[in-house]
């Protein structure tokens, strides 16, 4: 069997997970758990029928220093064989497999691959590692479950499984002994089913038996149900999915239908109508957020080697470039562009100053929040070179990486809908990769000219591997050497963007196509109807409850004008002087449901204050059950000015005073309105700043929470290690006591010295020779007063350290005694010389006997 690298076995998802074929023949259920996870694993396996058809793989955080007993313990609760995984072991149905300690687990085809552990102890994420490998192997057949445990291991793996269309489950946090792991997965919104361990087997069986829904493409009932589904999504999330490719949408809708056990699309729409949470889940399901650093490496290499240097060369005096990355997901594309720009500057080291401001947007607010944090798991090591990893990332405490702060500050992340929100303009780079493939051809033909409008002349457009500008060859030209980077060309006015998205707050209003005036040879009825509409239909504006303009009919220039400053398509800002108060009152009364409200004969005055025209205003709320629900139709109709009444000027001073007070009151009201409008703008700006600050505080709080969870997980392992160390300390204390008693029982004075002849340890008998006290440990032996007539002791000890040959001498004492002094090298268990051992054996009696014998011999002589 050919071995594969860890990079190949744990490969990340590709562009569209739903387009991948199914994995191996045997579907696999991955089970991740840590502290407190043994009981729920047993409860789950006890409910699994022996012939379920799945293979079950248990990934439990195990002590790498001890033999795992988990297979023997799990075998007691299930009749399925339970085995510890070995490298190359085949995956078999109705089997339970347990990960070996101190290893990661992946797949090599239909066999297991036991991999060396990734990350240091305390920072390993074996559950995430296995779930990501399972997602690649199983696709829509993969199942991943998270049980009790500390930290957040498993969350990233569940996301990978879910993006591939597999099933993800988590234990109900209230039932878990330690809930951080399931709670983290639930908070990340990557869990399909939250249940008790004993209920999961039945939920898994229901999901597996669910047949893919067959959508009749030509059925009117189906089309109506699909339109209602899109309307519910638009009403709650503000996102219109009607222009997305229907095949992609139906695949993901079918997944939610199977999880909700709905046989027909109409049944699922009924579930959505009464369940806002399910609408949010479907919204997340429809958003395809698969991304990674430097996708299509050759494109990025060409960008750094050719495109960006050419862009710099075109501005020799320096420049402040702008770039836009729509559909940035969790930020990898935007950070890749920032890193690529910095790499080019580092290579060329230009004398002029160049900067790049990147605007990164996405429809998914949660993905934007993650992108703002700039924190990534260790899997980016497969896509970023070691040099880039060192220069642009900082290791994080959880084993991942944090983007460098100066790189992070060059990117502004914001939530934006590319279909309905206005684009960024005057751009030098627009990186829209692997997004257009999810849109219909009609929407693609609208967005490509919009990209042309957003870019400067000569700007760069980066598209994905399956995206092209289509037939807009006069707008963009491919750069030589690559088919994915295009340069913006100047084009005639007829080919520029005629589609400019504007925000629609709560309703979907189809834009009327431009009316074509038929020739005289056309339909006579059509021509007459057009003339009648032009001559007799009043000018009208359709607005929502907040006054945002949704649609304009006829010529409204006499009543509305664009407000100065930032573009603001709101009726209150665009109304001409003299109409704002009346329009605000009309709109408020119409929204409150008072039927058609009208103001007749309203006088408009010119700059000199003279009456210029009169008009009738009407406001009518649209029916609540129609497609225009929630909007209000305002009409403007010019009418003749009323004849002026001839009257002599009143000489009554009271009347003149009242007229002056009325004029003054009008001026004051105008000033108050202007102040209120300015205050409203300031409050709006302050509110946006507060929201931004709140997001940063939330991000900081999430980082602190993550750090707390990681510390708890690490503390759990440290508690186990501490218990082991305590046991070893107890054993060491016992051995130390035995050694001390052994040395003292020999009745031999012994002193242990280190390499610098400082006292390391001594026996009690040594105190009769040297005046030693416990505080003398680590002091030089030469500092201690002794009874020996042996001034050469330190010199002999140094010689023993140098030659490693022991020395022995018979030394007298000042008190008349004699000792045999032996100096030997001190060898550690690793056979390293680390000082000397000096022993003193009392030979006073032997010396006295020797002296007596010599005296006797002299007497005999």
Image: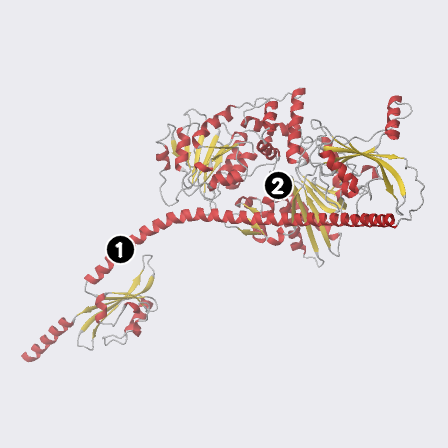
Could you say where residue 589 lies in the image, as x and y percent from the top left? Answer: 73, 35
Number of numbered discs:
2
Farthest-out residue, left: 860
| Residue 763 in view | yes
Compared across the picture, whether 175 is left or right of 751 comes to right
Determine the secondary structure under disc 1. Answer: helix
* Comes first in the chain, label 1 or label 2: 2
Horizontal side of residue 472 vs 398, given as left or right: right
Is residue 861 in view from this perspective? no
Q: Local crowd at mark 2 within 10 Å, few (<14), some, or many (≥20)?
A: some
Q: Which residue is mark 1?
A: 735
Position of residue 479 measured from the top left corner of the image (x, y, whole percent): 73, 43
- From the viewer's perspective, is residue 778 above or below residue 392? below
* Quarter in which the C terminus is drawn: bottom left
Q: Is residue 161 above or below residue 708?
A: above
Q: Residue at x 62, y 27 (%)?
A: 250
Q: Which mark, residue 365?
A: 2
- For the residues labelled 1 and 2, the Cα–Cα distance comes to 62 Å
């Amino acid at each position: 069997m050919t071995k594969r690298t860890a990079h190949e076995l744990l490969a990340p998802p590709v562009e569209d997970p739903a387009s991948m074929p199914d994995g191996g023949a045997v579907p696999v259920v991955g089970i991740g758990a840590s502290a407190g996870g043994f009981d729920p694993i047993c409860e789950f396996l006890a409910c699994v029928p022996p012939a379920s058809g799945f293979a079950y793989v248990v990934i439990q955080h195990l002590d790498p220093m001890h033999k795992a007993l988990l297979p023997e313990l799990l075998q007691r609760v299930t009749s399925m064989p339970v085995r510890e995984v070995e490298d190359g072991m085949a995956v078999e149905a109705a089997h339970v497999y347990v990960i070996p300690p101190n290893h990661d687990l992946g797949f090599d085809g239909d066999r297991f691959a036991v991999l060396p552990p990734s990350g240091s102890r305390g920072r390993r994420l074996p559950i995430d590692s296995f779930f990501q490998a399972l997602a690649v192997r199983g696709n829509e057949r993969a199942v991943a479950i998270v049980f009790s445990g500390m930290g957040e291991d498993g969350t990233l793996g569940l996301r990978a499984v879910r993006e591939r269309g597999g099933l993800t489950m988590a234990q109900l946090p209230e039932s878990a002994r330690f809930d951080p792991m399931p709670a983290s997965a639930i908070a990340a919104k990557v869990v399909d089913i939250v249940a008790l361990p004993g209920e999961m087997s039945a939920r898994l069986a229901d999901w597996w038996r669910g047949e893919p829904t067959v959508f009749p493409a030509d059925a009117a009932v189906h089309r109506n149900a699909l339109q209602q589904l899109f309307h519910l999504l638009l009403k709650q999330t503000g996102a219109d999915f009607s222009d997305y490719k229907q095949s992609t949408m139906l695949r993901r809708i079918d997944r939610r239908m199977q999880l909700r056990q709905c046989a027909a699309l109409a049944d699922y729409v009924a579930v959505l109508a009464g369940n806002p949470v399910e609408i949010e889940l479907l919204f997340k399901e429809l958003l395809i957020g698969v991304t990674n650093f430097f996708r299509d490496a050759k494109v990025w290499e060409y960008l750094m080697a050719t495109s960006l240097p050419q862009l710099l060369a075109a501005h020799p005096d320096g420049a402040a470039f702008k770039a836009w990355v729509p559909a940035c997901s969790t930020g990898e594309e935007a950070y890749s562009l920032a890193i690529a720009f910095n790499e080019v500057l580092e290579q060329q080291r230009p004398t002029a100053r160049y900067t790049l401001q990147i605007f990164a947007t996405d429809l998914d607010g949660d993905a934007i929040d993650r992108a703002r944090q700039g924190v990534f798991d260790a899997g980016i090591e497969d896509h970023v070179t070691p040099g880039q990893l060192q220069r642009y990332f900082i290791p994080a405490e959880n084993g991942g990486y944090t983007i460098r702060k100066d790189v992070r500050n060059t990117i502004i992340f914001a939530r934006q809908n590319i279909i309905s929100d206005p684009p960024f303009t005057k751009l030098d780079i627009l990186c829209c990769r692997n997004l257009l493939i999810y849109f219909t051809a009609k929407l693609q033909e609208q967005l490509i000219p919009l990209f042309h409008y957003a870019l400067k002349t000569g700007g760069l457009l980066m598209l994905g591997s399956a995206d092209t500008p289509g037939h807009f060859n006069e707008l963009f030209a491919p750069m030589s050497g690559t088919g994915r980077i295009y340069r913006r060309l100047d084009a005639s006015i007829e080919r520029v963007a005629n589609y400019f998205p504007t925000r629609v707050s709560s309703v979907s209003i189809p834009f009327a196509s431009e009316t074509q005036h038929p020739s005289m040879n056309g339909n006579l009825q059509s021509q007459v109807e057009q003339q009648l509409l032009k001559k007799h239909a009043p000018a009208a504006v359709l607005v929502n409850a907040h006054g945002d303009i949704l649609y304009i009919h006829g010529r409204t220039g006499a009543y509305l004008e664009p407000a100065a400053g930032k573009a603001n398509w709101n009726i209150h800002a665009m109304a001409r002087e003299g109409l704002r108060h009346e329009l605000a009152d009309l709109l408020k009364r119409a929204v409150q449901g008072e039927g058609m409200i009208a103001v007749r004969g309203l006088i408009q005055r010119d700059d000199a204050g003279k009456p210029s025209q009169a008009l009738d205003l009407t406001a009518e709320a649209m029916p609540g059950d129609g497609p225009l629900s929630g909007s209000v139709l305002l009409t403007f109709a010019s009418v003749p000015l009323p004849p002026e009444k001839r009257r002599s000027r009143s000489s009554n001073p009271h009347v003149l005073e009242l007229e002056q007070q009325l004029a003054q009151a009008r001026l004051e009201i105008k000033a108050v309105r202007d102040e209120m409008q300015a205050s409203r703008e300031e409050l709006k700006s302050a509110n946006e700043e507060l929201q931004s600050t709140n997001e940063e505080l939330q991000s900081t709080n999430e980082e602190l929470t993550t750090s707390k969870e990681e510390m708890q997980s690490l503390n759990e392992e440290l508690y186990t290690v501490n218990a082991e160390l305590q046991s070893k300390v107890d054993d060491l204390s016992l051995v130390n006591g035995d050694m001390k008693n052994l040395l003292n029982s020999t009745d031999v004075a012994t002193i242990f010295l280190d390499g610098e002849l400082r006292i390391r340890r001594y026996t009690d008998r040594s105190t009769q020779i040297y005046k030693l006290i416990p505080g003398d440990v680590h002091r030089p032996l030469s500092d201690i007063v002794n009874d020996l007539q042996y001034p050469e002791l330190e010199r002999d000890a140094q010689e023993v350290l140098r030659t490693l040959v022991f020395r022995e001498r018979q030394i007298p004492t000042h008190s008349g005694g004699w000792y045999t002094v032996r100096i030997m090298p001190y060898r550690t268990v690793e056979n390293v010389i680390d000082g000397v051992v000096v022993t003193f054996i009392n030979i006073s009696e032997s010396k006295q006997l020797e002296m007596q014998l010599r005296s006797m011999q002299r007497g005999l002589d």
